[in-house]
Image (tube, rainbow, N blue to C red):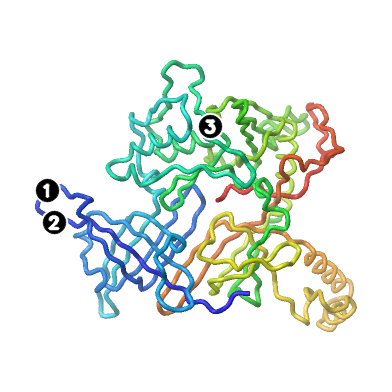
Amino acid sequence: MPGIFYPRHSLHIAAVLQDFSGGSVEVANAIEWDVTPRSAKLERNDIHTADTLTVTLNFREFPFDPRLIRAASVAYHAGNTRGGPIARTASTLRFLGVVDTPESDLSGDGETVTLEARDYTALLLGQKAKPSMAVDLDRPLDVVLRELLATLPGEQGTLLTTVLEAPPGVDLSWPIVPGHGRKNAKLAVDPKDTLWAIIRRVVEAHGLVCFVDLDALVVATSRTLGGDGQLRDAPRVRVTYGENLATLRMKRTMTNQTKPVALRSYNPLTGDTITSEWPTAAQRARPAGRRRARPAVVTRRTGGATVTHDDANAAEEFAVVGTWSGEDLYRLAQSIFTQRARYELEGAFTTHDCVLPMVTDRGSAADDFDVWSVHTATTLRVEIAEQADIAFDTSSPRTDRERRLVDRGYPPEVAAALVTSWAQLARIALPFIVRKASLSLDGESGFRAEVDFMAMLTPPTQGELTAEITMPELTAQPRAQTVTFDDATLVRGR
């Protein structure tokens, strides 16, 4: 179990200052120093949005008028200690980024400087498309990505390195970005694009996802829980209201507004990308009384897939691990859509504990969790501490729990239903996944984590389909009720 820890942080600043001489300002002339922030707030966002850091410093530790700062970057270290300062090591490095807004605030209440920064995703989001991004194709993806990164101005083009990640046991190599038989084929670049949009399009066309992690552009398979063995009794962070949470909020949407699910599977042997969605566009738009259209199972050569999130009715796309048939992918998309609609839950919690326990589905303890390392694919087990006088006390005999509720004024049939429902809930290890997290450390109020989470459904991996099921021929009305899948979730996070 977690012991006593002291959260600490440190900020390294590299700033280029104006000299007002009219000459050019060289990055090599940047000045660097370390300070201890008065307060800091680190926000972890989804993989396609830059993480942000807001730090407040005493003016004496950053005695510069914002008019002096030409450019600045920061490295933020934070972690838990047994006492003393934080070690500035790779394990405590939580953020690398560029300063967008320096602001000074001088008053009788205090003299401070506030720096607002975004991680290096901001460089890719802010770089508009240009002709040099039309790089040559028919080459490995990592080569194409490096040349795209090199189009960034100045030293920005050397800040990020390309990294390929795969779940344990998955053999993954850099795919070839095909030119589709065109001579001297080049990457298509739309003038309205950003560099980040171009990179995403190239990567996602191969059934992969990409995100920036500190100084690395990571290309990986989508972390579909189960595809990398995390589903089978995997440790999850255990948060419990009444023990380690200051607040807990959960909400269930009763109306089914779940976005359609589109699954995409890349076959590295054939270079094909198979996609399928449920419900299909034709099914969503069909007039009343009409028969359903044929399911959309489409095979494309790599490079032909595009992803858009602009249409509110567009399917939410995920890449799945393994080589699937179109029929299997179609049934899986239907199952996941149904399960996601059933468990449309979301919530949020706050905690002041910088270290939390972890537990497996079977209840056994695991290594403690460093809350500073929370990200958008951290899995949670959210619980409410048992109280002896209400329905979710599962340790006392059923009759005692029902009698307590009746004594509180509940009708006997309501008391029985509540006890039954809470008892069933106690047996379900419904997993949640972090959607967004905000970590802050203040010299006066201490550590605080605010975490938004959502319900997960656990998708089966290839080979987990029920063995005795044979897929019926795809017809205008597929017999989906004859096919079952384990409950599961697709996670597009890190």
Tell me the element at label 3.
Answer: loop
The residue shown at (34%, 54%) is 98
| CB within 8 Å, label 2 to label 1 | yes
**For mark 2, does the 10 Å Cα neighbourhood hold few (<14), some (14 to 19), or many (20 or more) residues?**
few
What residue lies at 72% left-to-right and 67% top-to-bottom? 364
Q: Marks 3 and 1: in contact by CB < 8 Å?
A: no
Look at label 3 and name its amino acid: Pro
Q: Nearer the viewer, mark 1 or mark 3?
A: 3
Q: CA distance from mark 1 to mark 3?
A: 46 Å
Give how far across and how far down residue 1 sits, in percent.
63, 74
Tell me if 44 is positioned left or right of 401 in this view.
left
Q: Which residue is mark 1?
A: 23
Identify residue type, mark 1: Gly
Residues at marks 2 and 3, CA–CA distance in whole angstroms:
48 Å
Residue 125 screen position, x and y as percent = 40, 44
Determine whether label 2 and label 3 are within 8 Å by CB. Answer: no
Say which residue label 3 marks: 175
Query: Which residue is disc 2 drawn over?
Result: 19
**Mark number, residue 365:** none
